[in-house]
Amino acid sequence: MTIEQQIKSLLVKANMTQTALAKKALPDLTNTYFNKKLKEGKFDHDELKKIAKVLGAEYHYEEPPPQPPPRQWFTLNGKEV
């Protein structure tokens, strides 16, 4: 599941819109830029931590061996989203 899909799943569970999330988690970004970053999955670790906090979740990151991409995921109430 991509970061975009995970965030959208958390939004549904939190009954929150993308606009509300953007305003609360990353108020310095315009809504358009937030949506672009969401679509591309181009958030840095600090941004993803802020997003997780607003959504009541936790952000996790695991550095992979040299070749595979890193694993990134959220948990909500101890369960992976």
Image (cartoon, rainbow, N blue to C red):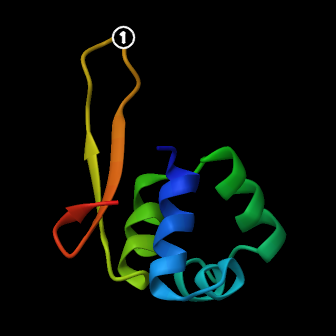
Q: Quadrant of residue 49?
A: bottom left
Q: Residues within 10 Å of mark 1 (few under 14, many from 20)?
A: few
Q: Which quadrant would residue 20 be assigned to in this image?
A: bottom right
Q: Nearer the viewer, residue 1 or 39?
A: 1
The residue lying at 78 percent from left, 75 percent from top is 30
For the C terminus, which image quadrant? bottom left
Would you name the residue on which mark 1 appears?
67
Above or below 33: residue 1: above
Residue at x 43%, y 84% (from the top left corner) = 54
Q: Residue furthest top?
A: 67
Where disc 1 sits, the SS reads: loop
Could you tell whether 36 is left or right of 53 in the image?
Answer: right
| Amino acid of disc 1 | Gln
In this orientation, which residue lies closer to the viewer: 32 or 55?
55
Q: Residue at x 58, y 87 (%)?
A: 16
In the rendered image, which quarter is residue 57 located in?
bottom left
x, y percent for residue 5? 55, 54
